Image: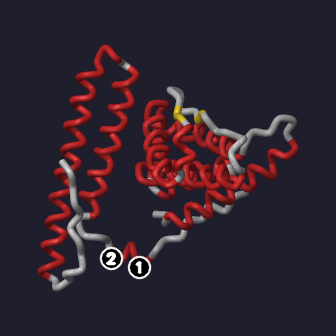
Amino acid sequence: MLCPSLMRDWVRNLLENEAISSKSSVQPEPPTIAVFEKLRRQLTASVGAAGFQALAYRALTLARVEVPLLIDWQITKDGSLRGFNELEPQMENKRAGIVLISQLLGQFQTFLGATTTQRLVQDIFPVIDTTIESDDSASATPEPFEGIFQEAGNLRMVSESLELLASQHPDVETGLATISRNIRNTAILLEVFAAVRNASDALREGNPTQQLTDYVM
């Protein structure tokens, strides 16, 4: 998997190259919008419109935690990005774009794998070096119960996707909301189970520095 710092360097190159290539356009789009739209058209073919919308919505939700500016941005029903404000300071907009696109590619890297994500991006941005460097130390010593935490994260994304669908379909909103809540609770149980077992193993191995994550039910 591509680590967050390398992912952001990768995305920064995408946006900078897009900004350079768009200078010849009569009405150039902001680089973030241009890159996002190219990714949307490409990645939708792999996961479908609803799948892309769900992953993009989660990416935006995660990015908003780091960049408050993104609170005014939205993912539309077709997965497009809306709310980009060119009146905001240029550097802040650039940072917001890097964070959002990085989160988006991170979601696809989780679901499709690093190699497939790399290939899909390379197809639309052939001039960008998308070589993914593996972290040998991380891959050689995987975190305990990493698979369980990963599946819990996937369930959380399913829950968020259902919440989004519930808001769009008032006639079945209650049912979808209930299913979403049950899936989220299952994810929490998986995380608690893995965290408790992980902490127990750490204590048996004499590693008292490993902390047990707090969960609020």
Seen in the image, is 212 located left or right of residue 24? left
SS of the residue under disc 1: helix
- Residue at position x 57%, y 53% in the image: 119
SS of the residue under disc 2: loop
Amino acid type at circle 2 is Thr
> Which quadrant of the figure contains the N terminus?
bottom left
Report how far apart the C-alphas of labels 2 and 1 lie in the structure.
6 Å
Residue beneath disc 1: 137
Residue 83 percent across, percent down from the top left: 61, 35
Q: Please, is residue 47 above or below residue 199 in the view?
A: above
- Residue at position x 85%, y 46% in the image: 23
Residue lying farthest to the bottom in this orientation: 206
- Residue at position x 23%, y 39% in the image: 183
Q: Please, is residue 167 above or below residue 137 in the view?
A: above
Cβ–Cβ under 8 Å for marks 2 and 1: yes
Residue beneath disc 2: 141
Q: Please, is residue 92 above or below residue 179 in the view?
A: below
